Every structure is written in C-alpha cells, then in structure tokens.
Image: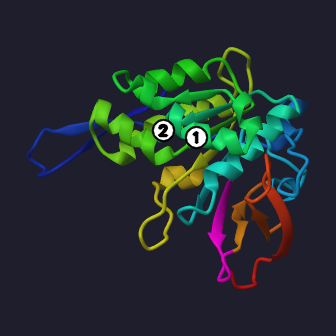
Amino acid sequence: MSNIVKIKRGRPSQKVGKIVKRFKPTTMTMDSFKFNPELFVPMKTNTKIDNLLSSEGGMMKGTNVAFVGDPGVGKTTVLLDMLADMQAKGNKVLFISGEMNRIDMVGYVKRYPKFANVPILFMGDYIENDPLAVLQAVLSEGYDVVLVDSFAEVAVAVVDQHGGTMKNAETKILNLLERHNKAENRNNVNTAFMLIQQVTKGGEFAGSNRFKHMLTGMAHMKFDSDGGRAIYFSKNRRGGEMNKLFFSLNNANHVGWLFTEPLNMAI
C-alpha cells in the first residue's frame, strides 16, 4: 500500500496541500520479457530500400518511422510504392490519407496501377465525424503496416473537432498508435506506422518531443544540386545502411531505386 505524503504549498499559515503518492520505479532485465518471434521478421519490399529500413532488411513490426522532405520530392509516391510492395508479399496494409480524395488518387493509380489494390481511408469522407473515433474504428482490425499522409493533417482534424493545441492533438493520436504498436487490436498485430510529417520553413522537423521519442527512425527525402532525388536516415534504432539511396520516379508502375552514396557526401 502506497504511503501518502501531504506537501504544503504557499505561506506556512495556509492550510493548502497536494496529495502525492510515493512510488518506487521497477528495474527489469531483457531476459524477463517474452516476445512473439514474428515481431522480428522483417516485412520486405524486395528492393534496395529494405537495406535502409533495418539491419534485418525490411520494415519491422511495431515500429514508427517518420518521413520528411522537400516539397514535390515524391514522399507519397515512394511510400505508396513501398506499401504496395509489402502488400504483394502478403502483409496487410492500409493507407490513411488526410489530404487527398478519390479524384486526387486517379493520377497516382494511372502511373502506378499496383496502387489500385491498396486499401485507403480518405479522412475527408468523414469530415463531420470525430477523427479519433474514425482512426480507432479502422485500426481496430489490425494491420501490419499503415501509411499516414500526413500526420500533421490528421492532428489538425483532431484540433478542429476537440479544440486545444496541436501538441495535445498529437498526444491523443500517438497514444492510439502506441496501442497498435503493442498489438492492442482484434487480430493482435504489432502495427508499424510510416508517418509523413511536415517540416518548418527553415527545414526543421515539426513535431512534439513525444513524437520524436516515439520514432524508431527518421528518414529524409531531398533533391540534390542536380535535381536528383535521394532518401537517407538520420536516426534508425533498427540499424540499416546509413547511406543516401537515390531514386527515380520515371519508371512505369514502380519507383526506380538507383544507387547509394555515403551519407557524408553533400546532397
């Protein structure tokens, strides 16, 4: 049973206090945990990007990876390509779009027909509904990989519905994502999230400390001085190559993964 301590505030003559419960943190060793072995089986695209995603070669379940980058560099296209490839390998995937509608997707599908088979939740279809309730309902089924485009747009929808600050909205969404990271859904699936996130005008990452701490990896997509496109990780707790991987969007029906360069070379 916890001991109760009454801490007085203000002047000594005031009989005002706050009840605080003492607690003792518990330390643990990793050999005391039990994990499902499938949690450590990578979800592959069978392309060069796998080597950047993790040292195992692929997207890992129960992780959260943010993707930021230059406007027009192809964030949505590249991530939909990865999502479709993981789906083709038998993984259950979902695309949550906070920005596009059905008509917007026509152009993507015309260029990349394999996108037509990716399940999509258009948040704009539920503009009158509580976005947190919409997310909870769709995620409850349990997915291997979910792409969110963009995290900021979904957070804005939460602010519009519930009021408060963007930081509070982010916390509510992150709490939901964390539950699915931990397989708290109908099919007990440790969901991995790929989160497109905005940057400030100065190119800095836009997001709360909670957001940053929850991230397994941070990927950047940028144009180089010659107009080429590359993706690289500045943080990745699951290992993977810390190189720049150049890519092209000129191929039909798939992203063209080209070649890698050391990360310390100017981009």
Choose between 21 and 58: the one closer to the eye: 58
Choose between 210 and 41: the one closer to the eye: 41
SS majority, magenta? strand
State which tag comes first along the sequence, 2 or 1: 2
Is there CB contact under 8 Å for labels 2 and 1?
yes
Going by the numbered disc 1, the residue's amino acid type is Val
Q: Callout 1: helix, strand or loop?
A: strand
220, above or below 36, in the image: below
Mark 2, residue position: 98
The quarter of the picture where residue 227 lies is: bottom right
Pick the quarter of the image with the C terminus. bottom right
- What's the residue at 71%, 36% (across, down)? 115
- What's the residue at 77%, 36% (across, down)? 114
174 left or right of 245?
A: left
Going by the numbered disc 2, the residue's amino acid type is Gly
138, above or below 111, in the image: above
Part of the protein shown in magenta: 217-227
